[in-house]
Image: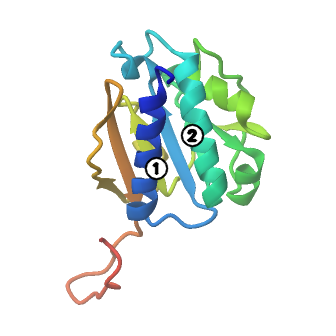
Amino acid sequence: MSAFEPMESTLSKILQGLIKIAELQKGNILVIGCSTSEITGEKIGSASNLEIAQIIISGLLAFVREKELYLAVQCCEHLNRALVVEKECVERYNLEPVSVLPYLEAGGALATVAMEHFDEPVIVEAIAAHAGLDIGDTLIGMHLKKVAVPLRLPIKKIGKANLTLARTRPKFIGGERAKYPHDIGK
């Protein structure tokens, strides 16, 4: 049994819960911010761990490929939280690439590993994702569509890092006479 096997199992449960309650559709974008330092109980940005990043990226890529989603991996603050995405996502959503190469000390472990495992990785400065997974308080909110809705799962942590999930929904517009479809805002 691997020392990280419980993490693999926990991530799988989180992703299964997320897909049920976030109502993600084929082609949607899932953004992840992750501090591998926080997972091990260290201060964010102080103890990046490539082994943990490998486990998380492997689990995420298997999940997004099966569900036909796009994954956006947020870099650390040293790269202004730019994102690693697949070229296909850039083309579909008309995103603007930027020039930078994430590595362990500037970009973080997860972005570094994403660059190695994505088919055609491209870095973009911003995105408007349909749902998000924040492991270790990495502040992914800037990369979600305008109306983010927090999601609750029984799992609150991965390792020692806080876990926050969100989905997005269209804005409610209009005044007191406006009517909305029943399924919006669940």
Image: 167 above or below 55 = below
**For the residues bearing labels 1 and 2, Cβ distance under 8 angstroms:** yes
Q: Amino acid at mark 2?
A: Gly
Q: Residue at x 58, y 18 (%)?
A: 50
Residue corresponding to mark 2: 59
Residue corresponding to mark 1: 15
Q: Residue at x 73, y 28 (%)?
A: 116
Q: Secondary structure at mark 2?
A: helix
For residue 55, the mark is none
In the image, taking residue 164 as reference, residue 127 lies left or right, namely right
Q: Residue at x 45, y 54 (%)?
A: 16
User: Which residue is farthest right?
Assistant: 120
Q: Quadrant of residue 26?
A: bottom right
Image: 62 above or below 69 = above
Q: Amino acid at mark 1?
A: Leu
Look at the image and tell me whether residue 173 can be seen: yes
Q: Quadrant of residue 117?
A: top right
In the image, taking residue 147 as reference, residue 145 lies left or right, namely right
x%, y% of residue 151?
31, 54
User: Which residue is farthest left?
Assistant: 176
x%, y% of residue 82?
58, 33
Q: Earlier in the sequence, mark 1 or mark 2?
A: 1
User: Which residue is farthest front?
Assistant: 1
Q: Residue at x 64, y 62 (%)?
A: 27
x%, y% of residue 177?
23, 90
In the image, taking residue 13 as reference, residue 102 lies left or right, namely right
Q: Secondary structure at mark 1?
A: helix
In the picture, which quadrant includes the C terminus?
bottom left
